[in-house]
Structure formats: C-alpha cells, structure tokens
Image (tube, rainbow, N blue to C red):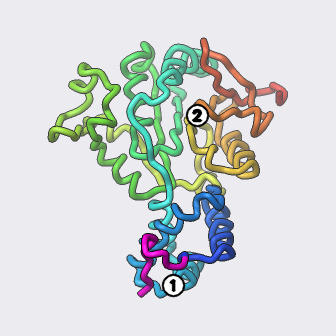
Amino acid sequence: MLQFDRSSETLPIMTDDEYAKFCAFFYRQTGIEYHDNKKYYVERRIVDRIAKTNSESFRDYFTMIRFQASGVEMQALVNLMTVNETYFFREDYQFDALVTGILPALVKGKRRGDPIRIWSIPCSSGEEPYSIAINILERWEQADSWDIEIHASDIDSRILAEARAGRFSARSVGRVSSALLSKYFTRKIADEYQICDALRGSIDFSLVNVIDPVQTRPFRNFDIIFCRNLLIYFDDVARRETVEMFYDCLAPAGYICLGHSESMSRMSSIFRPRKFKDVVVYQKPGPGEPLP
C-alpha cells in the first residue's frame, strides 16, 4: 500500500503533471479551481482516500474516480475537498434586507396564494436556510399570509446529512439570542443544540452540483436565491456560467444575494443591481423589461 509521510521528505504523491490533470478533472466536475499553491492541501486529502479505498497509487485512484459507475468515491472526495465554514446569522445585513426590503417589494407583484420560493445554495450544514426561516418568522409581519418554500442544496452529501439532522455547536449558534435559542432550539449537551422539528421539516434539502445542468434543471421559478461565498472558488468562466444558470432558475423580477466579496458586475451584466438601504443585491428583469 502507498505510504505517504510529508515529514519524512518522501516524494510527492503526484507529479506536477498528474496534479495538473487532477485539477483539470476536478474543475470540470465541480467548477472549483485549485492552483499550485494548494497542492499540499489536495495531496493530503487524496492520500486519505487512497488509504480508505486500498488503492495502490494515485494513478489507480484517479482511474477509479473517473470511471466508477456509481460515483460513490467521487462524492466521498468532494465531501473531503469542500469547505464548510458557516454559522447562524452570518452576514446578517442581507437577512435585514430580506425582511425589510426584498420580501415587501416581491409580494407587490404576487397574487394571494402564490408561493414565495427561496433557494439557499450552497447551504453547508444548514445554518443559512435555518437563519432565513427564523428571520422571516420573527421579523416579517406578513409571514403567516404567504406560502413560503425554502429549498437548500449543497454538493457535499455528508454536510447535507448534518443539515437535515439540525444539530449545532455552541460556536455555530453564538450569534443567536437567548430568546431565540429557547424558542427554536433544545440544548442537548453543553456544546450542542438541536433545532426544533418544525423548522427541520419545513426546509427541503437536496444534493446539487451547480455546474451540472441535469441536477439544476428542476430548480426553476425561484423568487430569491442566496448563493454566498461559493463563486470565489470558481474561475471567470465557471462564475459566468453559474450566474447564467441562476438567471434561468429565477422567476422574472427575482433576486439573488451574493457574498460580501462577490460582485455581479465582474461576472455578468444580465442582472440589475438593487439597493435596500446599504445592501446591494441583484435582480432579474421583470416581464417586458430589457436586459441592463
């Protein structure tokens, strides 16, 4: 079996050419781009999967993930390679904009009985979609008057299982007030909180790769998309293709919220910037409106 110990100055698990081929393959599969300065990060995770699968070498492992019919090992690698750093009420100025600006503007163009459809992607371990739900329930006075659907998706199957379970660390809920903790969570042990069943059951979690058109095709007619801090991992081509996919997924006049370091103007001109107080979000043109 392959032995790899960086501290013993052994040869790298991959040659530079093999690393380049792997990065190109992983990019085609996920849209995530790795450069030369990430080689150690990538190698450490691949060597873990080589050991877990009893592969003889990187070449054998690479062949497996490319041609395994079930895709099980590729999913395991994706789970290991993706970053899941989040917590409740992260970048909460956008949740303020949601309840004080976006939703009131949105319902002006809706009829009673129409659903309001929100998509959180990537949702990681669930803090974002649960934060959206809590903010709407607590702060939007029309919440009880509308049928609100919240869908949440991620490429990482392991983290989706955690999101569905709804168990969170004390650090994760650090910005949640004691009143909201008491209302929506049960403290299981000293450093773990369980979100209530009503919220867990109200959000639809699904496995989605944003660059796979087969997986994104069912997601249509959303009013609001939260896609925060994903596109920073993509190159210019993948960013443009992804925001064009989101354009197709939005209903006319729908909104998309990006992360604080992401700007739609650098990726595409098909959305209109909209400002709610000091928060900039992006809107798809409504019926009959020309592109910006």
Viewer-nearest of discs 2 and 1: 1
Which residue is at 36% across, 18% downward? 138
Image label count? 2
Residue 50 image point, x, y percent: 45, 78
Residue 170 image point, x, y percent: 26, 36
Does the magenta portion include 277?
no
Q: Which residue is mark 1?
A: 57
Which residue is at 41% across, 87% downward? 1
Q: Residues within 10 Å of mark 1 (few under 14, many from 20)?
A: some
Which residue is at 63% across, 44% downward? 231
Which residue is at 71% across, 51% downward? 235
Range of residues picked out in magenta: 1-11
Taken as a whole, is the magenta stretch helix, strand or loop? loop
Residue type indicated by callout 2: Gly
Q: Which residue is mark 2?
A: 259
* Up-down relation of residue 44 to residue 231 (above or below): below
